[in-house]
Image (spheres, grey):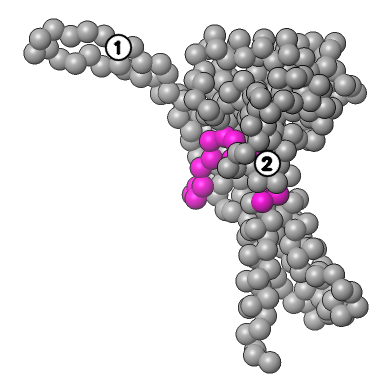
Amino acid sequence: MSVSIDQVFVKQFEADVHLAYQQMGTKLRSTIRSKSGVVGASTTFQKIGKGTASTKSRHGIVPVMNLNHTPVECALQDYYAGDWVDALDELKTNVDERRVVASAGAYALGRKTDELIIAAMNQTTQNVGDYSTGLTKTLILSALEKLNENDVPDDGRRFAVVGVHQWNELLGIDEFSSADYVGSDLPYLTGSEVKRWLGITWVLHNALPVSNTNRDCFIYHASSVGHACGQEVKTDITWHGERAAHFISNSMSQGAVLIDNDGIVRVKCGE
């Protein structure tokens, strides 16, 4: 056997981790602004104000919009997910232990990614509802009204993330459940339950903030929340002779921040 066979194992394992993370690890990363390859402990997202168009005289100077640039800092944090794989255990099971552990690590880091994004969303001060009702069409239209009042662009990049109970309530709305109104053939969010209605891509997520029977859902524009990544999911596999096992460590460095409060609305729902 080649002395470098362990390197093949490492590369295959790392490929499995990346694949699992991209396919099923995180549901929300692709719905917001995301910056990769960040160097340092933090990065900055620019929040740009509205410009104003003006006239000019013949041969005059074109007026300057003087756009307001507000930097929003996003701090990165390091996260780890590891486990042991006993060498002899692999001989006693017909389960692909490498793939199982790879998926578990990727899913754990994916959940952490979404946890960071949801925590950033939860900083919004724009709210509709009071937890006295479930997710109704009236609440949804009220949230859309706030976005429209704030001139949030309706450019196909509006998203909504709702809980399991709220998803079932949406299915009770004819306009949401009928194929005459919605579409599900979306080219992203692989592995997620998604639909498109009212110019919004609706995403099911079971880890939204909840207190007793009070659930927070969010309707937002992709540019309102930022996600920064200093290190994508990385895998390190080390053999420990005293344990006769490999220790498989997955790690990443990421952060999330609310960029524009005007672009996101919390929908307070009762369950």
Residue at the disc numbered 2: 27
**Does 5 appear above or below 205?**
below
Magenta region includes residue 44: no
Residue sitting at the far front: 180
Judged from the image, the secondary structure of the residue bearing numbered disc 1 is loop
Residue 97 x, y percent position in the rendering = 81, 69
Q: Which mark is residue 198?
A: none
Residue 266 x, y percent position in the rendering = 69, 19
At horizontal 80% and vertical 70% (from top left) the residue drawn is: 96
> Badges 2 and 1: C-beta atoms under 8 Å apart?
no
Residue sitting at the far left: 59
Residue 253 x, y percent position in the rendering = 61, 49
Residue 74 seen: no
**Does 214 appear above or below 195?**
above
Residue at the disc numbered 1: 53
Q: Quadrant of the C terminus?
A: top right
Residue type, numbered disc 2: Lys
Q: Is residue 6 left or right of residue 244?
A: left
At horizontal 87% and vertical 80% (from top left) the residue drawn is: 91
Real-space CA distance between mark 2 and mark 1, rounded to the nearest whole angstrom: 38 Å
Find residue 192 and report its image quarter.
top right
Find residue 125 and report its image quarter.
top right
Residue 14 x, y percent position in the rendering = 65, 65
Q: Is residue 242 left or right of residue 263?
A: right
Which residues make up the magenta segment?
23-40
Judged from the image, the secondary structure of the residue bearing numbered disc 2 is loop
Sequence-first tag of 2 and 1:
2
